[in-house]
Image: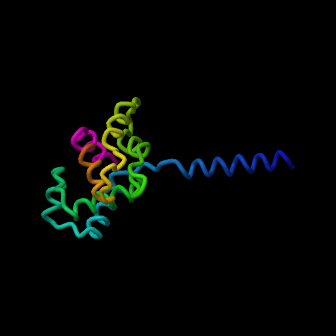
Amino acid sequence: MKNAVAILLCAVIGLASAADEYKLRTAEDLQTVRKECGETSKVTEALVAKYKTFEYPDDEITRNYIQCIFHKFDLFDDTKGFKIDNLVAQLGQGKEDKAALKADVEKCADKNEQKSSANAWAYRGFKCFLGKNLPLVQAAVQKN
């Protein structure tokens, strides 16, 4: 009986751990989320054209759009900020050494000392990381 309880406990802990693991998103997932967030954030066609060239102006619509994508990809929490391990997992797909990537993500994932709104916080980190790693972001967007 003790063994059965121990085995059941291990199984439950294993399932809980598995549930906490980050699920990598695909390019198809990104397309779906972009559409959803574009609609909820009321992104205009003019802004979509800018986003396609990796130009993200600092306006309310764009900040809401970025925040929405980060939420749906489980990369950002409005009170805790950036989920660094999830960002590294998502952007570091196929890379063996993720230490440099993690260091770059950590440089951009501030603790919101400025007390900015959540959408400004998410946008600021996104722009910082985009500035440091545009080729990596472009490659991650194109993966299937």
Residue lying farthest to the left in this orientation: 46
**Residue at 32% from the left image edge and 66% from the top image edge:** 36
Q: Is residue 111 left or right of residue 5?
A: left
Quarter of the figure with residue 110:
top left
Foreground of the two, 78 or 129: 78
Residue lying farthest to the front in this orientation: 114
Residue span colored magenta: 130-144
Q: Is residue 136 above or below residue 50?
A: above
**Residue at 59% from the left image edge and 47% from the top image edge:** 17
Residue 125 image offset from top left, x and y in percent: 29, 48
Q: Is residue 63 above or below residue 99?
A: below
Quarter of the figure with residue 79:
bottom left
Residue lying farthest to the right in this orientation: 1
Residue 95 image offset from top left, x and y in percent: 38, 33
* The stretch drawn in magenta includes residue 141: yes
**Residue at 22% from the left image edge and 60% from the top image edge:** 62
* The stretch drawn in magenta includes residue 10: no
- Number of numbered tags placed on the structure image: 0
Q: Is residue 76 above or below residue 129?
A: below
**Residue at 76% from the left image edge and 46% from the top image edge:** 7
